[in-house]
Image (spheres, rainbow, N blue to C red):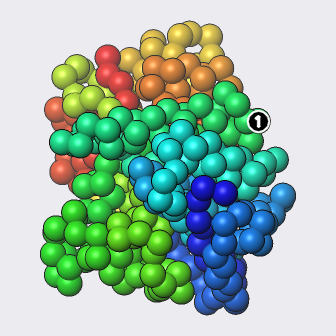
Amino acid sequence: MSVYLKSLHVTFEIVPDFKPYIHFAKFSSPINFDINEGTSLSALNLNLDDNIVYDISFDQSTTNTGIFIKAHNNSEIFMIEVYKKAGTSTEDYMFELETIIHSLCEDKLLLHLIYEKPIKSNNFRSSQVLFQLEGLLRMFAKRYKEFKSVKYETISKFEWAANIFDKQKFGSDYSDKHLSKQAIINLFDWTHYFGSSLYQDNDGYEAVGVMMGWFISAYDPLGRPYVRGDNFNGTVGCIVLPGVPYSSLYEELKKEEVDTKWFVFNPKTSIFKNIIKAAEQNYVVLVHIEDPYIKLALSVESNLKLFECDYFTLVIATPNFMSASAKRILGSQFHFYL
């Protein structure tokens, strides 16, 4: 083969009462770890479980691509680097990389695929290859069935590093690959089992940073997806919270003395007439949504992926009258407004 590989596989005890979007960065004690190197995937002895859902992230590189695979329940992780041997063409490297990823993930259950956004640099050829690697990752959904329903996500180096770096210890020079490695080991000490990378950029470590930094930026401490919508410039603002129980949100708002009401959806009139009817200046209104057609309509209107949740909580507010406490809990951005 025209590549050289290195891998770390760690298994963990199950975190009690584990909630994947709250405890995504929490790992119990390691049970076992295994490190392998070689010129083929078979030499690494890596086997993903058919019955476990995995998330996968990439720090793609023209020389050494980092891959991080995490069981969605944090029961095991895989850190992998795929290094391009001297004299290997870009085309051969990309072919080998695609073959390795497909062979590793074939017929497995994948939920999120996260990769670092490529950026333009002064090295035109290097930038071109990085964008080609991005295209390769995006094409997996067209070529391989295990990627057809995967949720593609991207994050910039600055964004994920800002979430990972302990700035008191490591400062904020996110371009320093050595500091990046140390910052990741500081948060996830089991990564030190991987040892030295195959290349100076520590791509295997940075693939861990890509995934964990994305989860931190995508979900709040209660496991709710952060709103990435428009700033309010209308009369009524709406936030869609997939899988968040309206009763627990109601209690949270009441603790902060935010005036809150429940609203029962009227199926005989339109979604937006319901919203206008429910909105009140001095109240935050919560609506429990289970109807699949309403969930789909709200997902489309909000430019959200249709989450695999049994229900949504729709938050309806008049932002010009929202208290500071309500904004602290709900944020000040909205998925859509009327």
Image position, residue 87 (x, y; %):
48, 53
Look at the picture and state if 117 lies above or below 251: above
Q: Is residue 120 visible?
A: yes
Q: Secondary structure at mark 1?
A: helix
Q: Nearer the viewer, residue 14 or 54?
A: 54
Quarter occupied by residue 251: bottom left
- Residue at figure coordinates x 26%, y 76% from the top left: 179
Determine which residue is flagged by label 1: 145
Look at the picture and state if 200 lies above or below 31: above
Image position, residue 207 (x, y; %):
46, 62
Look at the picture and state if 135 lies above or below 181: above
Q: Nearer the viewer, residue 204 or 149?
A: 204
Q: Is residue 84 left or right of residue 7?
A: left
Q: Is residue 187 left or right of residue 333?
A: right
Image position, residue 154 (x, y; %):
42, 44
- Residue at figure coordinates x 39%, y 60% from the top left: 213
